[in-house]
Amino acid sequence: MIVIWKGWGLLVLVIALVVSLATMMLLATLGVAHGFGPALGAILSAVAIWVVGNKLNSPLKNRVLVDQNTGAEVILKPEHSLFFIKMQYWAFIVGAFGLFMLAGAFS
């Protein structure tokens, strides 16, 4: 079975959708041009994804287990990823997408 996310990696999609929709609704109520909503939503969601991804994949959450028989250490690291890309790195992808949409809104 192929797993497309590990840990809380699915939050990338949830954060992107919720922040983008909230931004578009806010801009619609303020009467701002329609083309800027999705772009600004993607950029703001990229910031949120970066913050949450860094928090969840923090090296401070590593656990060290020691085998009692051999004394060997095993380090357990948290992994929260979507499509094999760590959560915080999705911020660059979503942010770039937002910048391309913003450039398209100006043209």
Image (tube, rainbow, N blue to C red):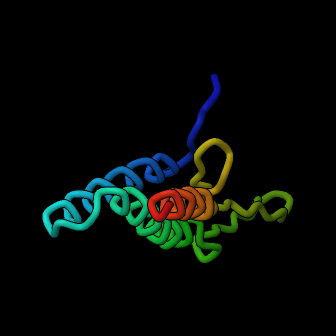
What residue is at 20 percent from the left and 58 percent from the top? Answer: 25
The one of 40 and 107 positioned closer to us in this rendering: 107
The correct choice, above or below, for 47 with respect to 97 in the image is below
Name the outermost residue toward the front. 107
Is residue 107 rendered to the left or right of residue 3? left
Quadrant position of residue 15: bottom left
What residue is at 56 percent from the left and 42 percent from the top? Answer: 5
Quadrant position of residue 30: bottom left
Name the outermost residue toward the bottom. 60
Q: Position of residue 38 (x, y in %)?
A: 38, 56
The correct choice, above or below, for 66 with respect to 1 in the image is below
What residue is at 69 percent from the left and 63 percent from the top? Answer: 65
Q: Position of residue 55 (x, y in %)?
A: 51, 72
**In which quadrant will I find the N terminus?**
top right
Q: Position of residue 93 (x, y in %)?
A: 61, 57
Name the outermost residue toward the left. 29
The one of 105 and 69 positioned closer to us in this rendering: 105
What residue is at 67 percent from the left and 51 percent from the top? Answer: 85
The one of 72 and 22 positioned closer to us in this rendering: 22
Q: Is residue 78 visible?
A: no
Q: Is residue 38 visible?
A: yes
